Image (cartoon, rainbow, N blue to C red):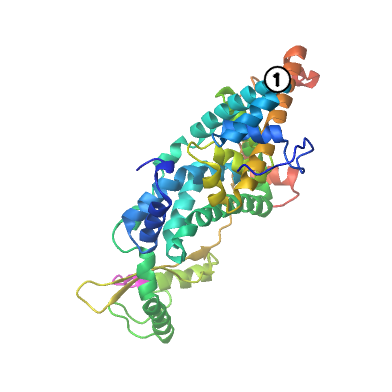
Amino acid sequence: MRPFLQMTMFEEHQLAGGAIAGNGEALQSLWQHHRRWVAAVLLAHKPRDAELDDLLQDVAMALVKNIHTLKDPASVKPWLRTIAVNTARSEGRRKKVADQAAPVLAESARRFADLRASTEAQQAREEGRRALEAAQTLPPEYREPLLLRAVRGMSYRHIADVMDVPMTTVETRIARARRMLRQELDRTDAETETRAAHGPRMNVGDNES
Amino acid sequence: MNEHIPHNSGGFDAEPARADLLIGRIVDGEAFEDDWNEFEAMSRSEPSMLVALARAQREHAQLEHDVADAVATCELIEVPDSALHGVSMAARFRQYSGWAVAAIVSLALLTVLGVQMPGGSHSGNQAGLIPASMNSEQALNEYMRTGMAEGRVVGEMPTVLMNVQQVPSSREMQVVYLRQIVERARLTDLSVLNVERDEFGNPRYVSTPVHRVASRSTGLRY
């Protein structure tokens, strides 16, 4: 499989056409060709504590199940993006409904999720994913093009095709996103410096039995 | 990409600043000759633009690295094997969906009317007797009847069609469908796992009876 940029638009459409017609190998190639940016879309829209791999698997299943409904091979990218966004959002709704339906279990699940999210955030910082952590605080309309641009080989044109918006919109959103990212990084840096200057906070009640 | 975009350094709802757009194009490898020339001219009068460019490049490289790291495992996610063998299941479904609906309706009618199925028998049961020679259909019917009487079986969800295939060298169709039976249970020893922290601040799992959690946090009674 050649890298993303090296496949022409014509080849992409051929691949999509084959997949729509029921060619299994074309479908596999189509998935391998697009899955990296699909993962970035999921990363931009998924709930914080949802597993990226699980959601990506769901998108792959939806692709296999629904590819025959795609009328135009040229629209495969926005179609795939819609599946990814819906998958990520329905995961968010599912978690919300589950929380409402089972308040007892939800309490422990929420505590676990909070703990896991804070642990993941901590791990992300420790593993050097500080920029991604900051990017995930941005509004989704800015977060998505910024994360797509961070996938190697994704140009403004590719991002515009995926998001089905004009290229100038992609460019302005990325420019705004970068400014927000810079401010967020400055803010977290300032917080870290303040914490370092004042030392760890001690809660008096912690030592009481 | 070289259309005129007014210089504006307003908030996020306004057009981004011209400098931000130029820096973005340079960082993203989307700058044309005119963009480079304009950036050079601007940075001569405003040297801080060079610092801003360096910072933007560093942050982009960091974000690119972070995203590559986060999505690295996506290379392991493949489409299911069933999609790779010839005509897709979806295409087969389209071809035979009419047959499938007819087959499901027929199955339902035959069951309701108590007609003898191939390899099966009447769906009626003799109360309290479970013959040793009972087939799967009879056993399921008996389970449903006894389960409902005990209050364990609540009912059955609508049948879900999963796959339809033509049986090789035959005019028959094989219909695979999902039957979902809803059960109810009453438990006296139900616990949930909570995550708490020990004296060192490390997370640990603690099993807590549901009635304690419920009475404390939600007011539910069991």
Q: Position of residue B38 (x, y in %)?
A: 65, 31
Quarter assignment of residue B134: bottom left
Residue at image position (43%, 42%) is A4
Q: Kindly tell me whether residue A118 is visible in this rendering.
A: no
Give how far across and how far down residue A160 sits, in percent: 57, 49
Instruction: Answer left or right for A78 relative to A140.
Output: left
* Front residue (pair B165, B30): B30
Residue located 35% across and 59% down the image: A18
Outermost residue, left side: B169
Q: Does B173 appear in magenta? A: no
In this figure, which residue is indicated by the disc labeled 1?
Answer: B47
* B149 or A75: nearer the viewer: A75
Mark 1 crowdedness (10 Å alpha carbons): few <14, some 14-19, many ≥20: few
Q: How many marks?
A: 1
Q: Is residue A1 above or below residue B180?
A: above
Residue B88 on image: x %, y %: 35, 63
The span shown in magenta is: B131-139
Image quadrant in which the N terminus of chain B is located: top right
Q: Secondary structure at mark 1?
A: loop
Task: Identify which residue is drawn at 50% across, 44% down.
Answer: A37
In percent of width and height, residue A106 lies at 65, 46
In this orientation, does residue A66 appear?
Answer: yes
> Which is more toward the observer, B180 or A16?
A16
Q: Classify residue A71 as left or right of residue A14.
A: right
Q: Note whether B101 is above or below A130 in the view shown.
A: below
The chain containing the residue under callout 1 comes to B
Q: Amino acid at mark 1?
A: Pro
Quadrant for residue A208, please give it. Answer: top right
